Image (cartoon, helix red, strand yellow):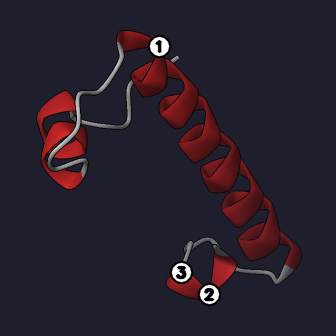
């Protein structure tokens, strides 16, 4: 599985709290799922380009 997220960006977004190592993996899996769904939606609509509206 490809890591889609930068840990430093996640830490910055979670300002003020610590981030457990298991959180990164769970978040990455969720993002992978969102990307897969967006690709399917784009293809279902006859497009080869994933757009914000597909999320």
Whether tag 3 and tag 2 are in contact, CB under 8 A, the answer is yes
Relative to 35, is 33 above or below? above
Question: Where is residue 51 shown, x and y percent of the image?
Answer: 53, 80
Relative to 2, is 9 above or below? below
Query: In the rendering, which numbered label is found on residue 9?
Result: none
Q: Residue, x 29% and y 26% (percent of image)?
A: 19
Question: Where is residue 34 shown, x and y percent of the image?
Answer: 65, 54
Q: Residue furthest right?
A: 44
The answer to whether one can see residue 2 in this image is no
Q: Nearer the viewer, residue 14 or 3?
A: 14
Query: In the rendering, which numbered label is found on residue 22?
Result: 1
Whether tag 3 and tag 1 are in contact, CB under 8 A, the answer is no
Q: Would you call the spot at circle 3 few (<14 residues within 10 Å), some (14-19), or many (20 or more)? A: few
Q: Which residue bears the numbered disc 2?
A: 53
Q: Residue, x 72% and y 74% (percent of image)?
A: 42
Query: In the rendering, which numbered label is found on residue 51?
Result: 3
Question: Where is residue 18 shown, x and y percent of the image?
Answer: 23, 28
Q: Would you call the spot at circle 2 few (<14 residues within 10 Å), some (14-19), or many (20 or more)? A: few
Separation (CA) of disc 2 from disc 1: 29 Å
The mark that comes first in sequence, 3 or 1, is 1
Whether tag 2 and tag 1 are in contact, CB under 8 A, the answer is no
Quarter of the image with the C terminus in it: bottom right
Separation (CA) of disc 3 from disc 2: 5 Å
Image quarter of residue 23: top left
Q: Residue, x 35% and y 17% (percent of image)?
A: 20
Relative to 19, is 55 above or below? below
The mark that comes first in sequence, 2 or 1, is 1
- Circle 3 — which element? loop
């Amino acid at each position: 599985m490809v890591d889609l997220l930068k840990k430093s960006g996640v830490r910055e977004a979670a300002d003020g709290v610590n981030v457990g190592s298991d959180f990164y993996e769970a978040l990455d899996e969720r993002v992978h799922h969102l990307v897969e769904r967006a690709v399917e939606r784009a293809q279902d609509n006859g497009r080869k380009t994933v757009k914000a509206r597909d999320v």
